[in-house]
Amino acid sequence: MLEEPPIVDEECDRGFIKKITEFGGGDVQVCMQCGNCTGVCPVSMKTENKVRNIIKMCQMGLKERVLSTPWVCATCYRCFEHCPSGMNPAELIVALRHIVVREVGPPPFVVETSHNVADLGQSMKLSANIMEMRKEIGLPAEPFDKLFRDKAVNDIRTIMRATGFDKLIGIKLGD
Amino acid sequence: MAGEGEAKVGVFVCRCGANIGRVIDCENLREYASTMPGVVTAMTHDYLCSEDGLKIMREEISKSGADAIVVAACTPRLHEKTFRDNIEAAGINRYLLHVANIREQCSWVHSNEPYKATEKAKDLVRMGVRKARTFSPVEGVSVQLKQEVLVVGGGVAGIEAAYDLAELGYRVHLVERKPVLGGNMATSFTCLLWCHEVPGKFQTISFRQGTFPTCDCSGCTITPRLVELINHPDINILTMSEVKEVSGHVGDFRVKVVQKPRYVDEAKCVGCGNCSIPCPVTVKNEYDFGLADRKAIFIPYQQGIPRKYLIDMDSCLRSRGEECSACLDSCPFGAPDYADKGREINLDVGAIIVATGFETYKPHVKGYLGYKESKNVITAVELERMLDKAGPTGGIVIRPSDRRVPKRIAFIQCVGSRNRRINEGYCSKVCCMYTMKNAQAIKETHPEVDITVYYIDLRAVGKGVEEFYHRTREDYGVEYTRGRPAEVLEEKGTQNLIIRAEETLLNKITERNFDLVVLSVSLVPPEGMKELAEMLKLRLSPDGFIQEAHTRMKPVETSIDGIYVCGCAQGPKDVPESVAQAKAAALEAAILLHKKVWKTESLNAYVDSEKCIGCELCIETCPYGAPVLEKVGQGNKARIVEALCKGCGTCVVACPSRAIHSRQFTDRQLTNEIRAALEVK
C-alpha cells in the first residue's frame, strides 16, 4: 500500500510564484498544463518529476517539494521551443536552482563542480585513467598548457568574485 | 437661448446607491455647487438614471429655469445619452449637458480617501459648471437613409442576414468572393451531403454528417435557404465579386464592387455539365485539396449554388493561345463567353453588413506536426472533403500515401489555436465539436477504425453538446488522451506516424503508432480581412477578427455607424450562433433604415474655412475618414463630413492653423475648464 498524505493548505506558499519571477523564472501562471514540454524533454522520461509537474508544483506553491527537483534538467531549451503559452520552463528551472542554493544551500555535487571550475577552469577533474588513455594515443596528458589554463582560471576567479559566486557556494579563493 | 457665459446652470449629483455616496460626501458637494456663480439649482439623488431620478430632474429644470446642465455621476460612456434625452424632454437643447465623472474617476479609484475624493469631485463639478456656462446649443445633423443594404460574404451568416432584410422589404446586394454561395458551411468545413444510409452494422441509423451537435446534413440544411435566396426578387447576388472601394457614410455608402470574369454567361448556363465532358484539360481540384481532378470548365462542388459553370482561364488552353472551343461547341445554350472581362458595379447603400467568415489555419511551417512533410498528416478540412459522399473519395476515408483505409486515426486538437507563438492564442471554440462530429462520422462508415483524440482541455459547451461528447466516447468508443503532442514522426517504409506525447493524466510519456493523423485546425481571419477593415475604417480585435462596438450590449454593431458585423467575421463561432448573430445584424440594420432619417449623436468638429490652409493633416490623422478636401476659389479647403465625425478631437489637435474646432470643446470652453481646475480654493 502506498502511504501518501494529501497535500494540505499549509504546504502551499502562494508567495512562491512572485519569488520565482524575481529570480528570472518568468510567469508560471501562463502554463495551461498541456504537457508539450514533457513530451519533448529528453530527461523527463528518466525522472518522476516531469517538467509539467514542476510547473504545476510552482503554480500551487509547493515550495518544499519543488526544491528537490531542479537538478536533472539539461537546459537544452526544447521545452521553450515548443511551449504554446510562450513560457520558458528551462529558465524556470534555472530560477529554482538559484532559490535552492540561497535558501537550502548548494547540494554536494554543485559544490564539488564549482570547486573544479575555480581550481581547474573546467567542471570535471581528469581521471588518471583518461590521462593514461590520452598519452597512449599520443596526446599530452592534460588538454591545455599551463599558461593558457592559468589565465582562464584567473579570469574565472575574477568573475566569481565579482558576482559573489564564491561566497554563495562557499569557495575560498584566497587573495 | 443662453448667450456665452450667461447660462443658468443646474447641478445634479448622483449617489449611485452606495457606489458614489459611500465615499463622496454628496450633500457637501451639493452645497458647494449651489454657491457657485451661475448655478441656479443643485440637488442630489440616489439613482439619477432611474425613472424617478429623471422625472425629478425634469421637474427641477422647469422649476429653476436652468438652461445648461451638469450631471455629476458615472462615466458619460454609460448614461450621457440617457441624460441628453432627458434634458431634451425638459425643453433644453440636448447638447447643453456636461457629465462630471465622480464614480470611475473619483469614488472608485479613491475609495480609501473619502475626504480627498470629495475635494476632487468638487473640482470636477466646478470645471463642469465653468464650462457649461459658456455652452451654446448645437443642432444635430440629419442624414437621409438609402433603403438598400450591402452584405459582404455569402456564407451562412451573410445569406441569413440578406434573406431577413429582403423579407423586410429592403433591396439587398450580396457580394461573395467565391463562385458559389454557402461559404464554409456548404463547402469544405461541414460540407457533407451524406443523406444515404450507410451499409454495414449501423444500417438502421440514417446518419447524416454535417453540423454538430445533431449531425444534420449541412448541405440539406443550407440548400433550401440558398434556393430561396437566388429566387428572391429583392436580392442581387454577385458571386466572384469583391468590394474594392468604399466611401460615404451611414445612410449613403458608395461602394465599388469588382466582379471577376466567369467566362460563362450566368443567365444562359443551366448547369447541365455538357461542357466539361469534352474539355481536354485536367487539373487537381483546389476545392478538393487536390484529392480529385477537375476540368478547366467546372463547378467547384456538385451541390454548389448557384449551379453555374466557370472557366479557370489559368489552365484553359485558350490562355496559351490555342483555339480550343470544346465547351462552347458542346453547350446547347452557347453559355461560354471567352471575351468576358468581368465588370465593375457601383452601389449606393444605406447600411453594410460584414459577414466575411473565416479561413482555416494552414500549419505555418512546413513540417509543423508533420504537415506537408508526411503525406498521411492531413487537416480536418481535407478529411471532411473525403467524408463527403459527393466528394473526391465518395465518402471513404483513405490514407493519401497508399489510398488504403486507415486502421488507427489520431486527431490533434488546438492546431493554430491556444498557441501564443503564432497569434493571440485564442480558442477557436468549434474544433472540439467538429472533431467529435468527424470521429463519429468515421466510426459510422468504418466501425473497425480506432480513434484517439489528443487534447489540452475539452470545451464542449452549449445546448446538447455535452451529450454529443458523451455519445462520442460511449456509443462510438473514441478514446481521449490529455496532452499536446510533442512530435509527429514518420515511420520509414510504412509511412505510419508515431506521436510522442505526455498523457498528462497518467503522468507518463506515450509513443503511439497511427495510420492517419488529422490536425484539428483553428479558425483564422480570412485573407483580405485587414484590407476590408481598413476600407471600412473598422477596428480589428487583437485576434484579427472585427471588433464589435460593445462586447455585451452592442455585439453586432461596429465602431462605424451603419456598419454591422455577424458570423465568424467577428470571431470563431458555430452555425447556430452565426445565424443568431446574422439575424441580429439584419434587425439592427433594419432599425436604422426604417427611420428613413438618421440624426447624429456625437458632437462633431467643424472647419473655419478662412483659417484652413488645405494642408490635409486632418485627413491623415482622422481615424474615421471624416475630413474631405474641397475646392474653394483658388485653393483647397477641408470640410468635416458630420455624419462620419465622432467628435474625438484628433483633427483639432493636428491642425497647424487652428482652423478646426470641436463643438462643446472650443478653446474658450476648455480654457475655462482648465482655469477652474487650477483655481486656488
Image (spheres, coloured by chain):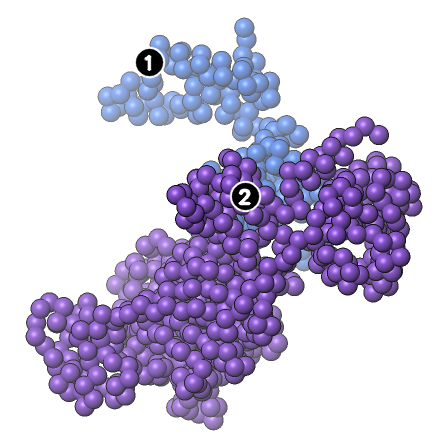
Q: Which residue is mark 2?
A: B608
Output the chain of dot 1.
A
Mark 1 or 2: the one toward you: 2
Residue bearing mark 1: A145
Horizontal and vertical percent position of residue B71: 79, 50
Residues behind callouts 1 and 2 on a single chain? no
Determine which quarter of the picture holds residue B258.
Answer: bottom left
Quarter location, residue B522: bottom left
Q: Chain of mark 2?
A: B
Q: Nearer the viewer, residue B359 or B177?
A: B177
Q: Could you tell me which residue is drawn at 67 percent across and 58 percent down?
A: A1
Q: Amino acid at mark 1?
A: Asp
Residue furthest front in the image: B633
Chain letter of the purple region = B
At horizontal 41% and vertical 46% (from top left) the residue drawn is B633
Residue B542 visible within the image? no
Classify B269 as above or below A62.
below
| Coordinates of residue B465 in the picture (x, y in percent) | 58, 75
